[in-house]
């Protein structure tokens, strides 16, 4: 994903549950990333020509982004890389 998906300062202010809107937005964006990576891993799994390491990479990314979404939703600091 590109860094442009996370504009600086977007959505400032209080959101649902007292979270900063940007934290809530970030959690939602991370869950969308999770869905994309999990879908990719499932789609590649039955293809014999795709190396297992690629399937595992996307599965690992889905787990990592899910954990980051939980941290963001709870107001924690989340480090992102494109």
Image (spheres, grey):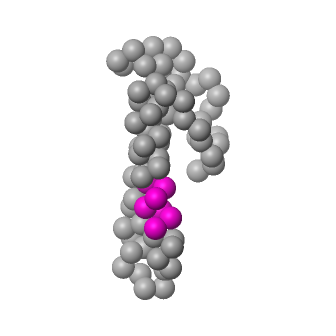
Question: Could you tell me residue 3's position as x and y percent?
Answer: 64, 42
Q: Residue at x 45, y 14 (%)?
A: 14
Q: Residue at x 47, y 40 (%)?
A: 68
The answer to whether residue 39 is visible is yes
Question: Could you tell me residue 70's position as x and y percent?
Answer: 40, 36
Q: Which residues are magenta?
A: 56-62
Question: Could you tell me residue 67's position as x and y percent?
Answer: 42, 43
Q: Residue at x 64, y 28 (%)?
A: 8
68 sits to left or right of 17: right
Q: Quadrant of residue 42?
A: bottom left
- Depicted 24 relative to depicted 59: above or below: above
Asked whether residue 58 is drawn in magenta, I would say yes
Q: Quadrant of residue 28?
A: top left
Residue found at the far bottom of this picture: 48
Magenta span dominant secondary structure: helix
The front one of 71 and 23 is 71
The front one of 78 and 24 is 78
The answer to whether residue 36 is visible is no
- Depicted 20 relative to depicted 1: above or below: above
- Depicted 42 relative to depicted 63: above or below: below
- Depicted 76 relative to depicted 67: above or below: above
Q: Residue at x 50, y 79 (%)?
A: 51
């Amino acid at each position: 994903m590109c860094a442009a998906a996370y504009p600086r300062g977007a959505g400032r202010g209080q959101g649902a549950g007292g979270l900063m809107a940007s934290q809530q937005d970030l959690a939602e964006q991370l869950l969308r990333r999770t869905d994309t990576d999990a879908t990719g891993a499932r789609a590649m799994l039955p293809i014999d020509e795709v190396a297992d390491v690629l399937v595992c990479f996307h599965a690992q990314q889905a787990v990592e982004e899910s954990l980051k979404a939980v941290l963001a939703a709870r107001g924690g600091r989340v480090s992102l890389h494109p």
